[in-house]
Each structure stands twice: as C-alpha cells, then as structure tokens.
C-alpha cells in the first residue's frame, strides 16, 4: 500500500485486445479528470490475462495512442500477466476460507444443464448477463473433487457465493453516481475465480490489483456496474480496502445512442489517419464524460 493511501488514485485499465477507440478514450478522460479534480494520481493498467485475445502489439499501440493524445501516467505500468503470483496467493486465501470449489464443467455441459432446467424455470437463476451457473459442481463431495484435481483433470475454480456471503454479512459501497449501494453479492452467481486455462479471472485480478495499486476511486463504464457487487464481496473476504466507485455513462452519438460502427470510424488510429488532431479526438471522446 503506498504511503499516500488517502490521496485520490484513479486508473484506466484497458485490455489490449484491439485498437484503442473513442469509448476507451472517454473512459480514460473520465479517470484522468477525476484524479485531476482531486489533485490525485492517475495509473494505467494493462489487463492482459487472456492470452487468446490479448496481443503485445496492441499494448504498444494503445500506449502510443494515449501518449499522442496527451495522457500521462505513472510508471511502471502494471501488466496483469506479470503478476500471476498475486492472484494465486489471493486464490489460496479464498480456498483457505472454504468458499471456493473446483468446477469441471465444460461450456457445453453448462449450456445443456441450463437448457434442461429451462423446462423448470425456478431452477435457472437469471443474471444481468444471462442464466447463472447452475451449480453442478457446487455439491460434489470434497474428497472426490480433490481426487479429480490431483489426477490433473482440467477445472476452473468458482466462488461459492452463498457461503461467502454468509461469512461476510451484508456489504455496501459508495458510488459517486448513486450514493450508498447495497451489494447484491449473488447477482452474477458463483463466479469463476480461476479459469481452466488461466489461473485467474477478470473479477479476481481487478479486485486484487486495485488494492495492490492503492486505487481509491475506481472509475469505469456503467456496463461493469454489476461486477462491482461481487468485487465488493471479494474485498471483504480478502480484507482489502474498499475504494469508492464512479460508474460513468457510455459514449453516446448525437442521437443519444451508444456509439457503434454505424457512426463511422471510432478507432483512434483511423481518426489520426484522417488527419484529426489530438484536440479534435479528445473533444469527440469527451461526449458526456461528466458521467
Ligand atoms: N479491462 C476492462 C475493460 O477493458 C476494464 C476493467 C475495469 O475497469 O474494471 O473493459
């Protein structure tokens, strides 16, 4: 934890899965402005845990675009793939609390189970992103599950949200846009903490990193609002400090719709190639960046 833990620290945390676009710049501006308003710190974090989708060349290009636009951040930049040990340690702590379980289900098995349970809708809980994991592996006998893990069977690790919530009791966080929000910890069901192929997940690594980096104000798009409910649970289980949050609106076009390909070029590379200046692009990205 940095000495100046009480200073407002924000971050922009893109995944290098493609070219930087106006939506990213909108989010980055929001984080930078929040830090500036509080004379705080601004960090950049590269969220590259998914080796199938992330490419080092995209990281190089996105940093170059951000620098060209005039953004400045503190070095060193935290790159998630360099810190797998931190996520493994957090996973071990959660396992020691008895709130995790191995999940051997393939995507197809999960989909089949949801389809089967679809005939009995009371068995399929719906989340904001679709049906929740139906809990097939939650009640496997512990020893049998451990033997399968020891035998090297591929598996994810999931959070038993009901057990975890029973340990922590009710939780809330302070959201600059919404005030005090009561955490609905089961909103996403038994989330994956470690994937089969990568021994962490978005939820685990983001929560751990925000704490390690001393982020005191997490700014991110409204589309990630539902994730905060379970991040709050992970913070409580891991005894991590609780940042404030500000979920900002997404960039809209002139008609008030979410920006899409139909609005023409949104990629910063393409806009630069068209001859737009950094100021032009920042103005376009600002949109309704006040949230
Ligand atoms: N890496 C995530 C994204 O690119 C953002 C994560 C976050 O801000 O918590 O959507």
Image: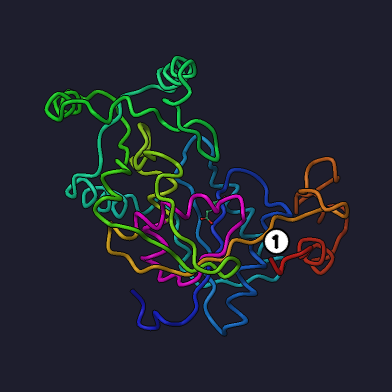
Q: Position of residue 59 (x, y in %)?
A: 57, 52
Q: Position of residue 103 (x, y in %)?
A: 30, 29
Secondary structure of the residue carrying numbered label 1: helix
Which residue is label 1 attached to? Answer: 26
- Viewed as shown, does residue 99 lie left or right of 125? left
- Above or below, 147 against 173 in this view is above
- The C terminus: image quadrant: bottom right
Range of magenta residues: 207-234
Q: In the depicted view, which residue is nearer to us: 183 or 215?
A: 183
- Above or below, 266 against 288 in this view is above
Q: Position of residue 277 (x, y in %)?
A: 84, 65
Residue 12 in the magenta stretch? The answer is no
- Viewed as shown, does residue 41 lie left or right of 231? right
Residue 215 in the magenta stretch? The answer is yes
- Viewed as shown, does residue 166 lie left or right of 228? left
Magenta stretch, main secondary structure class: helix
Which residue is found at the position 57% from the left and 70% from the top? 176
Which residue is found at the position 49% from the left and 51% from the top? 47
Which residue is found at the position 59% from the left and 43% from the top? 17
């Amino acid at each position: 934890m940095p000495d100046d833990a009480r200073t407002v620290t924000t971050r922009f945390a893109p995944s290098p899965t493609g070219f930087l676009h106006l939506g990213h710049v909108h989010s980055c501006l929001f984080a930078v402005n929040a830090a500036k308003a509080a004379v705080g710190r601004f960090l950049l974090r590269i969220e590259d845990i998914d080796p199938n989708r992330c490419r080092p060349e995209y990281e190089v290009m996105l940093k170059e675009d951000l620098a060209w636009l005039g953004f400045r951040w503190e070095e060193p930049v935290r790159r998630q793939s360099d810190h797998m040990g931190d996520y493994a340690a957090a996973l071990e702590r959660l396992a020691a609390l008895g709130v995790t379980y191995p999940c051997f289900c393939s995507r197809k098995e999960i989909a089949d189970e949801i389809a089967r349970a679809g005939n009995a809708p009371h068995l399929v809980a719906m989340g904001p992103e679709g049906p929740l994991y139906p809990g097939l592996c939650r009640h496997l006998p512990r020893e049998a599950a451990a033997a399968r893990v020891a035998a090297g069977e591929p598996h994810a690790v999931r959070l038993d949200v009901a057990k975890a919530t029973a340990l922590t009791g009710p939780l809330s966080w302070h959201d600059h846009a919404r005030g005090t929000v009561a955490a609905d910890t089961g909103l996403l069901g038994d989330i994956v903490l470690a994937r089969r192929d990568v021994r962490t997940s978005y939820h685990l690594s983001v929560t751990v990193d925000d704490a390690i980096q001393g982020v005191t104000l997490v700014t991110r798009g409204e589309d990630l609002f539902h994730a905060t409910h379970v991040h709050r649970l992970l913070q409580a289980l891991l005894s991590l400090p609780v940042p404030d949050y500000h979920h900002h609106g997404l960039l809209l076009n002139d008609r008030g719709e979410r920006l899409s390909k139909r609005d023409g070029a949104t990629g910063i590379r393409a806009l630069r190639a068209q001859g737009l200046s950094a100021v032009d692009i920042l103005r376009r990205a600002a949109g309704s960046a006040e949230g």
